[in-house]
Amino acid sequence: MGIQLSALHWVYIFFIVLIIGFMVKKRDTTLVCVAGIFILAAIACGSLSLSLIAVFNSFIYAITELLPTILIISVIVAMGKVLSETGINDVMISPFTKLIKTPALAYWVTGIVMLGISLVFWPSPGVALVGAVLLPVALRAGLPALGVAAAMNLFGHGIALSGDFVIQGAPKLTADAAGIPVGDVVSASVPLVIVMGVVTTVVAFILLRRDMKSGKLRVTRTYQPTIERENESRASLLTKNQKGIFAFLIPVLYIFNVILMILLQLTGGDATALIGGTTVFILLLISMVAHKNKGLEKTTSYLIDGFTFGFKVFGPVIPIAAFFYLGDAGFAKIVGDYLPAASSGIVNDLGASLASVVQLSKGFGAITLAGVGAITGLDGSGFSGISLVGSVASVFSAAIGYGVETMTALGQIAAIWVGGGTLIPWALIPAAAICNVDPFELSRRNLIPVVAGLIVTTLVAIIIM
């Protein structure tokens, strides 16, 4: 038999349902999460002052847990800005432009380069880096701008972001909420990310070829991105030889990072810290060489831009994560030791109780996690709801008895593919803007491939669970 559920458990369930409902209606969930934290604390300790303190402490706890992820993303975005301003990104990607001779090659080369860049730099700066150089080349090769935007979306905001194997921001959020190591989520997500990526990109390419042959899609213009024109005006920051040296040095340093990770068996936070330290070093070096006497001030400016981006992205995530941290070990640290002695955490209690009432199947669990992940992505963030995915996966795995890693990875993939920048129009704006296409049209272009990918990936998850 599961533990006797208390008012805390039922209130927690109520607010989870409420949060999902607000996400479905495309409304912000911050107020709901804060209200949930306050009410849970009030029920637990029965004190107004302690409940107010718990709300603020929950934010501190969430920020503390998320800070390494926020920092690594911030410094990478800062480095991406200096690479763009100095034109080093042009030199780094230019060898790939020689490969693009046909629309098919334009689609796959753009996508693969975007995938590689996004794994290290994250997709948002990756869009600027790749679009500035490869978009004009792809247009000349005959690939419509909508096809370029779709390739960047599916490979960057889809494959790279849903796995997030290098920075590990997404796995960190879901793993914490599920109460399992980050490495377990990463390992479980590898086959699912591969299946999802292959299905979506192949289906998208087939549909793209069909519409190009029918004349529904065609190249109607030449295009020179704003970023490319800006780089032309800043070409004097570095000489051609200096750009070449940095373009060679940066990949070498990151390859060296990967070698060190393997040799020293660095994972999770240590691996992220290694990449972060290397990124800061690259940022400082390029900034000082490019801006000379103004290098000190420009370095700070780049970091401010990076931190602004990082906290802007994770601002909506913090209150949501704060609420879901209450479902696990965070409750005692945020509110206090108010749970029953037999309790192993609100989420685990719910799982144990559910297991004593109904026998869940792995198929039902996988389908539910994919659905919950897709629903949490409806807010257009992709990240704001994946803590919920981890919590639900923990509940279902406790009821089934296994599969927490696979279900967590599946929910994470569904959430990020839907909300991280492939379906929700307002999340498509970066790629749509640089390619000068309608984000709603891009969303419609991605719909069938992403839905097909989610169906196949969910079936594969059921098989391998």
Image (cartoon, helix red, strand yellow):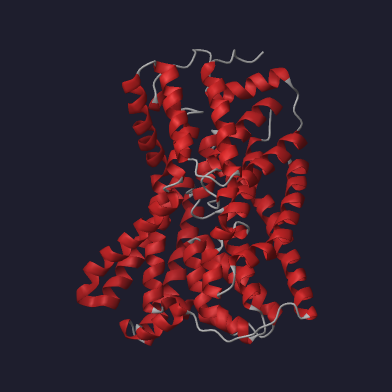
Report the residue at 52% width, 62% height from top. Answer: 123
Task: Please give left or right for residue 274 compared with residue 7 in the image.
Answer: left
Position of residue 34 relative to residue 314, above or below, is: above
Foreground of the two, 155 or 230: 230
Image quarter (top left, top right, bottom left or bottom right) of the N terminus: top right
Task: Please give left or right for residue 425 compared with residue 45 in the image.
Answer: right
Q: Number of marks in the image?
A: 0
Position of residue 120 relative to residue 163, above or below, is: below
Residue 102, horizontal then vertical, whole percent:
69, 84
Report the residue at 41% width, 79% height from top. Answer: 87
Residue 330 is at least partly visible in this image? no
Task: Please give left or right for residue 250 compared with residue 441 in the image.
Answer: left
Q: Quadrant of residue 205?
A: bottom right
Q: Residue furthest left?
A: 293
Report the residue at 76% width, 69% height from top. Answer: 207
Q: Quadrant of residue 294?
A: bottom left
Residue 276 is at least partly visible in this image? yes
Foreground of the two, 4 or 169: 4
Residue 316, horizontal then vertical, whole percent:
45, 46
Residue 5, horizontal then vertical, whole percent:
58, 15
Position of residue 153 relative to residue 110, above or below, is: above
Residue 277, horizontal then vertical, whole percent:
36, 57
Image quarter (top left, top right, bottom left or bottom right) of the C terminus: top right
Position of residue 452 relative to residue 210, above or below, is: above
